[in-house]
Amino acid sequence: MLDLRLYIAQRLSALVMVPLVLGHIAVMIYAIQGGLSTAEILGRTQGSLLWFLFYGSFVIAVSVHAAIGLRVIAHEWGGLRGRALDLLMWGAGAGLLALGARAVLAVTLP
Amino acid sequence: MTTTPDTLHVTVQRGTEGATRQETFDVPAYENQTVLDVVTWIQQMADPTLSYRFACRVGMCGSCAMMVNGEPRWTCRTHVRKVASDGRLDIAPLRNLPVIKDLAADMDPFFDKWVAAEARHHPSAGRGDDFAPVTAQEPARAEADLGIECINCGICYAACDTVAGNPDYLGPAALQRAWTLLNDSRDADRDAILAAVSGKGGCHNCHSMGSCAQYCPNDLNPMRAIAGLKRETVRAAWGRKRDA
């Protein structure tokens, strides 16, 4: 259920995610030294173009990658085919994008 | 030290698609005995209505593959003592294929996918032309040579869990043949092969689980061929975009 386009999209989104995951984990470890508070996080992220671009691209890559992965699982393990399969993929991708974008905007808008 | 039991307890899947049952037979055990010998004994000495398929008996024709104790094997070259040390055998038709009757699987979907993968030679020369010079040293030829000893037995297809979950998937054997042709300097339609293996059931569905390479009786590695196809299809698509 994967053609060349979906395969490339999933591989490219994985490529984007590799440095972002490492950066995310590194910042988490660094940021929690000496305790962590909401104000501290928001102080770092609000109004920051860098963190908006960092987590914005992360959310886009995750939405693409996970939606295609779910498509494969739903087909091979659940037997879903045709339009239902397309709907699931686009729905999952759009849902992840909407939830992720909402979170990114919430913490980065000044 | 293991001793050979006097009798093998053999369970055989009987019947046609959708109406299968298990039957058991006691078969005399011998020191040297293949699984195909056991099946033949059952048909000749116990039940002449048992259907199965074989031809060469020496591992060349690829027609006698069956599931033996849950794993796909070429039965003519599989010694009983290697797969059934406790004297029990469970024999069934190849997995992932419809059953015609008893141990004879319907190979049509398997070979239809070879055609769908464009795994057939596209001639680049005619009858009047000279022979194409092909040397074994060329890298592309060496890559093709790794996959050309396929005997079409269907064992990789039966072993593949991706085929089991995705019936449209072309499968390891067809994709490996497409890869050998893609690397053959005498093949004239590279684009047709790349397009055929890039569709919904194409090479990009492979999860690289490696059962094809694990079970291939000729020690071929279709997973390597499929990885090559993934690489070449992406390279070709990338090239097209840059040319446009």
Image (cartoon, rainbow, N blue to C red):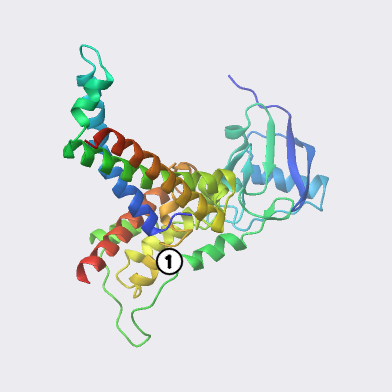
Quarter of the image for the N terminus of chain B: give it: top right
Residue under the point 53% across and 53% down:
A85
**Which residue occupies the foreground of this view, B139 or A109?**
A109
**Which residue occupies the foreground of this view, B71 or A75?**
A75
Question: Could you say which quadrant of the image residue A81 lies in?
Answer: bottom right
As drawn, which residue projects farthest toward the top? A34
From this view, report whether residue A88 is shown above or below residue B8: below
Residue under the point 58% across and 44% down:
A78
Q: In terms of secondary structure, where does tag 1 sit?
A: helix
Give the side of residue B76 with respect to residue B11, left or right.
left
Residue under the point 29% across and 62% down:
B141
Give residue B91's position: percent from left, percent from top.
68, 42
Give the side of residue A110 with respect to residue A98, left or right.
left
The residue carrying mark 1 is: B196
Quick one: label 1, few (<14), some, or many (20+) residues within 10 Å? many
As drawn, which residue projects farthest toward the bottom? B128
Question: Could you say which quadrant of the image residue B27 lies in?
Answer: top right
As drawn, which residue projects farthest toward the front? A110
Quarter of the image for the C terminus of chain B: give it: bottom left
Residue A60, visible in the rendered structure: yes
From this view, report whether residue B122 is shown above or below residue A46: below
Task: Name which residue type carries label 1.
Answer: Ala
Give the side of residue B82 with respect to residue B189, left or right.
right
Counting labels gives: 1
Give residue B192's position: percent from left, percent from top.
39, 71
Chain of the residue where label 1 is placed in the rendered structure: B
Residue under the point 38% across and 78% down:
B123
Give residue B208's position: percent from left, percent from top.
41, 44
**Which residue occupies the foreground of this view, B228 or A48?**
A48
Give residue B182's position: percent from left, percent from top.
34, 65
Residue B216, visible in the rendered structure: no
